[in-house]
Every structure is written in structure tokens, then in C-alpha cells.
Image: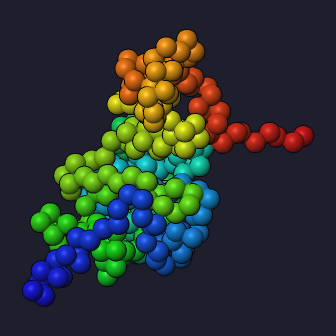
Amino acid sequence: MEILQDHEQIISMPRIGDKAPDFKAVTTQGDINFPSDYKGEWVILFSHPADFTPVCTSEFITFAHLEDKFDKANCKLVGLSIDGLYSHIAWLRTIKEKIEFNGMKNIEVKFPLIEDIAMKVAKKYGMIQPDESKTQAVRAVFFIDPKSMIRAIIYYPLSLGRNFDEIYRALIAMQTSDEFEVATPADWNPGDDVIISPAGSCGIAEERMTSTDELNCKDWFFCTKPLGKKEVLDKILKKPKLLVR
């Protein structure tokens, strides 16, 4: 019974809609108090199995290369692995000095990488999947909104590198849903039509089907409307700061 309880404790994880579990940690960028240090911003908290491993190296190079792009979308990056601080520092230095991937080189990882030797954070977030590994975190991705609520979770096995286009697309799609009170259909990207909520009454359903406005209703429950790419990105992305001369 105790073994079962330990197993359940290891694989427990927060759910979408939960407040992000809080923790204090040592990182390559100093101590952090999570998620309170990031209040008012989106955060992607992600785990990786271990330092000095090839798939993780390719991912960190890609995340670091895209950090400014995520920052413009008001989103910070925070990484985690079950390795020590000095191992983290040595690995990140090796990435910058020696590793080239997909044309990216001399990449400096500036976002924090959490030291989690005791696996306290990894267990709290359900990043340890015992049937995959008892000593390494799987490739988890937690999207946490400005109110510190978990909005989406993506899990990958140890052998599978993440799709960064999808991680960014998901972030922008959730921000679009919040800003414009719409839903986004399959494979949505900024500039594509968005979905409005299903009608809540027969009257509204009839009105939608007969309306001549911008709605495109295939049936009473499936209505889309255009939402321009510029309108979306102007609302979501940070504006460049003007230089004062």
C-alpha cells in the first residue's frame, strides 16, 4: 500500500485550471520564487531529462534562440532538470562555446534553469513518470497565465524533441482567446478565422443562421468569423520601444 501511495505521489500533477504550485528554487539566473516572481506575465515552465544529453541540447538551443520571440508575446521561459547548479552552468557554457544545431551557434541561454536534485519541483508538477524513468523528468511543458493559472500542459517522452512552432502557436492562440473572447479551430494560426461560442438559445441560433453580418455559420453550433493577423498581433505582441533622441 505504501508503495502504491509513493507511486501516486510521484505521478500526481496539477491540472488545467489549477493555480500553478508554488516553490522556491536555485537557478542559473539566481533564486526564484515561483510563480509570484512572474505575476502579470505568461510563463512556460518546461522540464528536460538531463544535462549533457543531445535531444535536450537541441531543445535548449532552440528555446534560447526563440527567447526574444516569446518575450515579445509577454511570455517568460523557465527550465528544469534533475541536475545540480554546477552541472547546469557547465552544460550551458558548452552549448555556447561548442554546439551548433540547425544553423544556430554561439547561443547563450539567458533564461533560468532550475536545480532540482531532490526532485521536489519535478514531483510537485508530475514531471516524473516512473514507467518512463524514476530519475529523470519527462519533457513537460506547462503554460501558466498572468494570473498564475495553468492553461495548458503538453507531455513528451524522453526520446521525442518538442515542436517549438506548436508551443508558440498554442501560446498565441490562448492569448487570442482571452483578448477576443473566441475559440480557435484545428491548426489555427493568426489571420485564420476564429470560432464563436455556440448559441445558447433557439432565438440566437436562428439569428445566427439568418444573419448577414461577418459570421459564417455552417450550422447553428458551428460559426466562424474573420480575425485579421495584424489585429491579433497588434493586440498581443509588445510594441517596440521608441528611441528618444
Q: How is the image coloured?
A: rainbow
Front residue of this view, candidates 170 and 86: 170
Front residue of this view, candidates 114 and 3: 3
Q: Quadrant of residue 232?
A: top right
Quarter of the image with the C terminus in it = top right
Above/below status of 224 relative to 16 = above
Lateral position of residue 9 relative to residue 223, left or right: left
Res 83 visible: no
Q: Quadrant of residue 91?
A: bottom left
Residue 177's x, y, as percent? 51, 40
Residue 86's x, y, as percent? 40, 75
**Residue pushed farthest bottom?**
2
Quarter of the image with the N terminus in it = bottom left
Front residue of this view, candidates 75 and 22: 22
**Residue pushed farthest front?**
203
Q: Please give the name of the residue rendered at 58% of the width and 64% of the height, measured from the top-left corner.
A: 38
Residue 107's x, y, as percent? 47, 49
How many numbered marks are there?
Answer: 0
**Residue pushed farthest right?**
245
Q: Please give the name of the residue rendered at 39% of the width and 52% of the height, measured from the top-left corner.
A: 152
Lateral position of residue 74 relative to residue 11, left or right: right
Residue 139's x, y, as percent? 29, 57
Above/below status of 17 relative to 7 = above
Above/below status of 226 relative to 173 = above
Res 210 visible: yes
Q: Please give the name of the residue rendered at 46% of the width and 66% of the height, measured from the top-left corner.
A: 19
Q: Please give the name of the residue rendered at 37% of the width and 20% of the height, measured from the top-left corner.
A: 219
Lateral position of residue 10 relative to residue 193, left or right: left
